[in-house]
Every structure is written in C-alpha cells, then in structure tokens.
Image: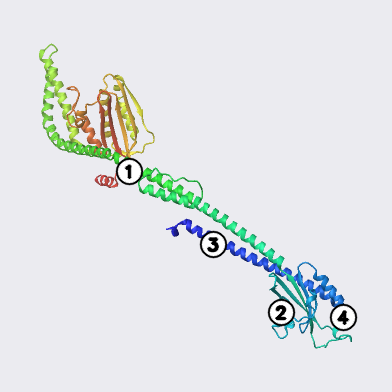
C-alpha cells in the first residue's frame, strides 16, 4: 500500500515542512500588518500632539478663526481623513470639514463607542485604547485617534473664560487617518507573501518529489528487484550504485553479498562435480589400506611358517656345505668330479643365503628407536652404494630439504630399507640413468622419495612386489625377500611404503615416517625396557 512506502512517508515530511512555511507566512503578514497600523497610530498621535500644541495659544486667547485656519491647513495633508475638536457634551467646535461644525457627535456610532462606553472614558483609557478603526461610507478604513484636552491651570485661572477647577477634561481632539494606502500596502505584501509561499510550495514539492524518486524510490525499487532476482536464482544480477549515501552503501553490500553467494554456489557446483572423483580417490585409499592389511597378514602368517622351515633345513645345509667343501678341496684340479663339487658348494651357499634371508624376514625384531636426523641416514646410505652406482653409470641427484625435524627411528633398520631400495633402483637401470633422492614434509609425515629412470614395473606386478619370494630378477640374483623385509620394517615404524611405476619411464618408492609418535606408544616402550 502507498501508506507503507518510503516515498509517502517522506512526502508527509515535506507536507509538514510546507505547512510550517505557510504558518510562517501568516505570522509574518500579521506582524507586518500590526507594524504598519502601529506606524500610522504613532503618526496620528504625533499629528494630534502637533495640533494641540499649535492651537493651545489661540484657544487660550479664544481666537477661533486662527484655530480654524490651523486645523484646516493641517487637514489638507495627504492621508488625513478628518480633524475634529468637540467639547465634553459632544458638540463639534472645530473641524477640517466646516459643514459639521456645531453638530453633535453620535456617541453610539462605531467611531465613538470605545470612549463613551464608560462613565469616565478619557480618564480611564490608556493611549493604545484611544485608537479605533472603523469604515467610512466610501468603504475604506479609517484609524481614529483621540487626545483629551485637559483643564490646565492656564484654562481655569484667567478671567476671560475660566473653567471650574474640578473639571478635568475640557474637550477632545479627534484625528482620523485614512488606512486606504496602508490597506493597499498590506494587501500587496499579503499577495506577494502568498505568491512566494505558493512558489516555495511548488519548488519544495517538486524538489522533494524528484529527490525522493531519484535517491529513495528508484534505488529501493532496484533493491527490491535485486532481491527478487536473487530469489529466482539469478546470481549474476548487480544493482547499479550511483551514490555513496546509505542506500548506495546498502546496494554495494547487496552486490557483495550476491558475489559471495555466487562464489559459494560455484564452489558447491565444483564440489558436486568432483564428488565422484573424491569418492574414487577415497576408495583407492581404502583399497590401498586394505591391501596393506592383507600384506601385513600375509607377512605375519608367512613369518611363522618360514621361521620353522629355516631352522629345520639350516642344519642339513650346514652339513652338506661342510662335506662338499672338504671333498672339493681334496680333489685335484684335473679331477672331473671337482667341477661338480664346485657346483654343489655354490648352490649350497645360495641356499644358505636364502635361509639367512628367511630368518631375517621371520625375526622381524622390534626397532630400537632414537631421535635421529633422517637426512644423515640418507647421506650414509647413498655413500655406501655410490661406488656401485658409478660402476653402473647411474647418476645420483639429491634434493634434500634442510632443517627437517628429527624423528624417532631405528637407524640401522631404516638404513637397511634405503640401501635395499637404492640397489633395486640401480639394478633397474642396466644401461645407466638418473636416481633422484628427495626429502620433505607431506601429510604431517617425513617423506623420502627414490625415483629412477629405469625399465619400470608392469602394472600387473605392482600388487605383488611386497610379497615374499616374488622377484622379477634373473634366477640366482635375488631371493624376493628384500622388499618384504623393508615393508615390515616401515610398518613397525608406523610408517608407509608406497610405489608408483610406469613401464619404460621408471619407478618411484616413497617412504613416509611419522614426525611425532603417540604418547601412549612411547610410554609402552619405556615400560617394556
């Protein structure tokens, strides 16, 4: 409804402003009218005093003609309607109009009522009350001012025309001032004031109307339109800001809010689009975790079996190796059986190495951890295999991040893992290549990467590389236990051992070790010691 609109409320404010201007104009006209009447009244009083002083001497000497001459001369002045002098009975003794000399004043007329309405009028009326305004037969207004002619000592002491001393008033001097010019001036002022009030009314009305429409109504409509657009889902709509006042700031805030909503909506859409990918990534992480658990289960079960088998076959192998070595030494070089005995000795040694590896795998001894610098462990491991790397024409690049925090590790076991990975990488580059070793912080863990440019691992073999006895090396060059043992060591350090590979481009092994161990775990280790 229009009564609830801001424009209507501001229009009401404008109405009260215009009403105030009208009241001011009315008060101003009344004040000027009163001022002009006051000026005429003061002029009439001054003329009355002039006549009274001018005729005083002639009246004392009873020179009526001279008094008539003075009154007639003064009466010819512009603005003087009439000058009269009448005695206490109301008889006109002197007048600027000779036709009414000797007549009696009508005491009930409008011009005389104010003075004759009381028992002793002239003695009781103050000077402001001795003036009255009345209309003539011609229709214009006249201001009448009366002045009492008092019985002074000069009047009742001489012998010529002495008056009784107890008579206080001898007569009245009545001055009539025409208000025709004053009324005309008042009317002109009133018309001008009304004209200017109407102009002011129109100017203020138009100004308020334009201002309200431009600075209030239109911006508010734009805001309402904007809210409807946003409610409809149009987040690209922007409210034009043309001013820097409160409404302009509100429009800017609205635009900023729309922009924030748009960004939030885009993020939601982007999140929705990538949700499937994130689900796949999380599924892959769960699959890898499951594989790790399966691998850990395999290693644990296999470890128990291997330990028993290794102990059972270790004694027979020792006997075979001892007697075959003695027979080999006893044979002459030309003996054809010596070559067969050498083969038995070599194969027996190979079996011994396999059994040793099985025992190392089966033992899985708990690490003896100490606070250590992982970068130092990396450097020592690289130094141990650097000669073999140079022989294979493999260049080792180090991208070690300095000032890594020290971590709790078993230095010997971790170094065993690093050397195993380094040797595998060197063997994967038979024609030479580059082996990059880097360290840093990832996922609040210390991460060490070993990246080679070798032949790579087929995708079908990646799930099996940590299985015991699985190897892609030629027969006699590996037992297939190195990565299994390394996996177990990293697992006992609460870390992760990950691998990524692509055939023909190389392989990357990543070892992740926790920076901080759980307090409960450290406490248990302390108690066990």
Residue behind mark 3: 16
Say which mark, if any, is on residue 112.
Answer: 2
Badge 2: residue crowd in 10 Å (few <14, some 14–19, many ≥20): some
Badge 1: residue crowd in 10 Å (few <14, some 14–19, many ≥20): few
Mark 2 or mark 3, earlier in chain: 3
Q: Secondary structure at mark 3?
A: helix
Q: On the image, which quarter does residue 298 sit in? A: top left
Q: Where residue 232 appears, x then y in whole percent?
A: 35, 47
User: Decide: marks 2, 3 in contact (CB < 8 A)?
Assistant: no
Q: Secondary structure at mark 4?
A: loop
Q: Is residue 420 visible?
A: no
Residue behind mark 1: 268
Q: On the image, which quarter does residue 483 sit in? A: top left
Q: Give the mark toward the camera: 3 or 1.
A: 3
Q: Where residue 461 appears, x then y in whole percent?
A: 20, 28
User: In this rendering, would 528 be left or right of 42?
Assistant: left
User: Alpha-carbon distance for marks 2 and 3?
Assistant: 45 Å
- The answer to which of 487 and 227 lies nearer the viewer is 227
Badge 3: residue crowd in 10 Å (few <14, some 14–19, many ≥20): few
Q: Give the mark toward the camera: 3 or 4.
A: 4
Q: Give the mark toward the camera: 4 or 1.
A: 4
User: Alpha-carbon distance for marks 1 and 2?
Assistant: 98 Å
Residue 39, above or below 3: below
């Amino acid at each position: 409804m229009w009564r609830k609109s801001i424009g209507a409320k501001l229009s009401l404010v404008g109405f009260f402003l215009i009403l105030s201007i009208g009241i001011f104009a009315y008060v101003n006209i009344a004040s000027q009218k009163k001022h002009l009447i006051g000026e005429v009244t003061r002029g009439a009083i001054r003329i009355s005093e002039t006549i009274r002083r001018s005729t005083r001497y002639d009246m004392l000497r009873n020179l009526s003609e001279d008094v008539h001459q003075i009154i007639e001369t003064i009466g010819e002045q512009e603005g003087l309607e009439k000058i009269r002098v009448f005695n206490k009975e109301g008889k006109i003794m002197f007048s600027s109009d000779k036709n009414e000399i000797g007549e009696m004043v009508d005491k009930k007329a409008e011009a005389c009522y104010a003075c004759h309405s009381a028992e002793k009028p002239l003695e009781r009326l103050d000077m402001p009350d001795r003036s009255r305004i009345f209309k003539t037969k011609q229709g214009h207004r006249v201001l009448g001012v009366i002045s009492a002619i008092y019985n002074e000592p000069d009047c009742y002491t001489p012998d010529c025309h002495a008056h009784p001393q107890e008579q206080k008033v001898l007569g009245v001097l009545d001055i009539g001032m025409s208000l025709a010019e004053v009324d005309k001036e008042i009317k002109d002022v009133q018309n001008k004031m009304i004209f200017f009030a109407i102009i002011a009314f129109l100017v203020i009305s138009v100004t308020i109307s334009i201002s309200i429409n431009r600075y209030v109504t239109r911006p508010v409509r734009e805001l309402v339109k904007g809210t409807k657009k946003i409610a409809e889902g149009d987040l690209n709509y922007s409210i034009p800001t043309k001013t820097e006042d409160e409404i302009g700031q509100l429009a800017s805030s609205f635009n900023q809010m729309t922009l924030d909503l748009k960004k939030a909506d885009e993020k939601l859409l982007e999140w929705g689009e990538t949700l499937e990918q994130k689900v796949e990534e999380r599924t892959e992480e769960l699959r890898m975790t499951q594989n790790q658990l399966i691998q850990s289960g395999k290693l644990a079960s296999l470890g128990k079996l291997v330990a028993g088998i290794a102990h059972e076959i270790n004694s027979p192998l020792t006997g075979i190796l001892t007697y075959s070595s003695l027979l080999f030494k006893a044979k002459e070089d030309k003996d054809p059986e010596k070559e067969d005995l050498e083969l038995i000795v070599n194969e027996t040694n190979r079996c011994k190495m396999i059994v040793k590896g099985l025992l190392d795998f089966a033992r899985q001894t708990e690490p003896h951890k100490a606070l250590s610098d992982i970068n130092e462990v990396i450097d020592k491991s690289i130094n141990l295999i650097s000669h073999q790397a140079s022989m294979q024409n493999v260049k080792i690049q180090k991208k070690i991040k300095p000032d890594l925090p020290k971590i709790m590790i078993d230095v010997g076991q971790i170094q065993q893992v690093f050397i195993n990975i380094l040797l595998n990488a060197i063997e994967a580059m038979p024609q030479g290549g580059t082996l990059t070793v880097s360290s840093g912080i990832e996922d609040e863990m210390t991460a060490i990467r070993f990246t080679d440019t070798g032949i790579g691992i087929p995708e079908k073999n990646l799930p099996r590389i940590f299985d015991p006895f699985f190897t892609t090396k030629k027969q006699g060059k590996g037992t297939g236990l190195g990565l299994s043992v390394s996996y177990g060591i990293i697992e006992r350090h609460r870390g992760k051992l990950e691998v990524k590979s692509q055939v023909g481009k190389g392989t990357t092994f990543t070892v992740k070790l926790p920076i901080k161990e759980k307090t409960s775990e450290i406490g248990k280790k302390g108690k066990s010691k």
